[in-house]
Image (cartoon, rainbow, N blue to C red):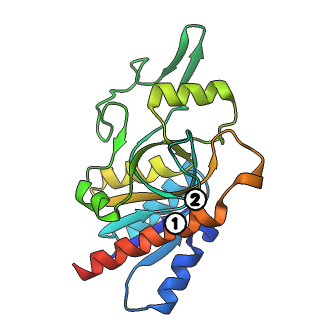
């Protein structure tokens, strides 16, 4: 099985690179794609064009929206949304689906979401499933946070998740996104952030899944 493990930054993949060096019998490729939707999409499409993997594992850190999402823990992202594609009007926020510009159920979307259909794969992680949103700018505004929470039932946010969901669904490649929670959305002071713990927990979950897949 050709497993491709991706993340935005090398720091998010460092422990997995080290694990691969220690145990060369476990085959997977580790590839940083860059920060943001655009870099992730372009780099991943280029890699798929060169050689289509059997499975894509996306990992890295993310921000959590509420207290039920615990800092330092890893979660499995079951769906992604792109909440910034829309407009803020006096009557409230409307996205491109609300405005009728795009079918909310037009493939690969389902009810506005990019949903991971590989339930058995997510089950193997043993992680809690949550809903993600992908943004171009880290969310700090309380009003924006309330929109994302209410309109999209967002649990976590990243800057790349939807790109991988979208491309994997289009190319019918099994995939899974595992995120370690480094911070609370809206909190800019890094004193309480859990970078190391988030990377450690996401790495452990990815490693455990890869070993399970090789053993099966």
Q: Quadrant of the C terminus?
A: bottom left
Q: Label 2, on which residue?
A: 72
How far is mark 1 from mark 2, CA to CA?
Answer: 7 Å
Q: Secondary structure at mark 2?
A: loop
- 105 relative to 57 in the view: left or right: left
- Quadrant housing residue 33: bottom right
Q: Is residue 96 visible?
A: yes
Going 25% across and 82% down the picture, which residue do you hit? 215
Q: Is residue 18 above or below residue 93?
A: below
Pointer 1 or 2: first along the chain: 2
Number of numbered discs visible in the structure rendering: 2
Q: Is residue 3 visible?
A: no
Q: Quadrant of the N terminus?
A: bottom left
Q: Are marks 1 and 2 in contact (CB under 8 Å)?
A: yes
**Residue density around tag 1, few if under 14, some if 14–19, many if 20 or more, within 10 Å:** many
- 106 relative to 77 in the view: left or right: left
Going 28% across and 80% down the picture, which residue do you hit? 214
Q: Is residue 84 above or below residue 42?
A: above
Q: How far across and how far down the image is residue 64, in percent?
A: 56, 45
Give the label on residue 201, or none: 1
Q: How far across and how far down the image is residue 210, in percent?
A: 36, 75
Give the label on residue 13, or none: none
Q: Secondary structure at mark 1?
A: helix
Q: Residue furthest top?
A: 91
């Amino acid at each position: 099985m050709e497993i491709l493990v991706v993340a935005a930054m090398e720091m998010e993949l460092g422990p997995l690179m080290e694990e691969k060096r220690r145990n060369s019998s476990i085959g997977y490729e580790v590839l940083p794609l860059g920060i943001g939707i655009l870099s992730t999409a372009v780099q991943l499409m280029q890699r798929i064009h060169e050689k289509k993997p059997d499975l894509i594992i996306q990992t890295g850190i993310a921000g959590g929206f509420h207290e039920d999402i615990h800092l330092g823990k890893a979660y499995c992202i079951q769906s992604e949304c792109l909440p910034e594609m829309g407009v803020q009007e006096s009557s409230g926020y409307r996205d491109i689906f609300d405005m009728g510009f795009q079918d909310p159920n037009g493939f690969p979307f389902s009810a506005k979401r990019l949903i991971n259909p590989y339930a058995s794969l997510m089950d193997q992680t043993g992680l809690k499933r949550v809903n993600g949103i992908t943004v171009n700018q880290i969310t700090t505004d309380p009003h924006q946070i309330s929109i994302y929470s209410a309109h999209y039932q967002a649990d976590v946010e990243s800057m790349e998740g939807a790109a991988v969901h979208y491309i994997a669904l289009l190319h019918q490649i099994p995939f899974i996104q595992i995120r370690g929670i480094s911070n609370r959305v809206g909190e800019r002071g890094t004193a309480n952030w859990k970078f190391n713990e988030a990377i450690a927990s996401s790495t452990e979950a990815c490693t455990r899944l890869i070993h399970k897949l090789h053993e099966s």
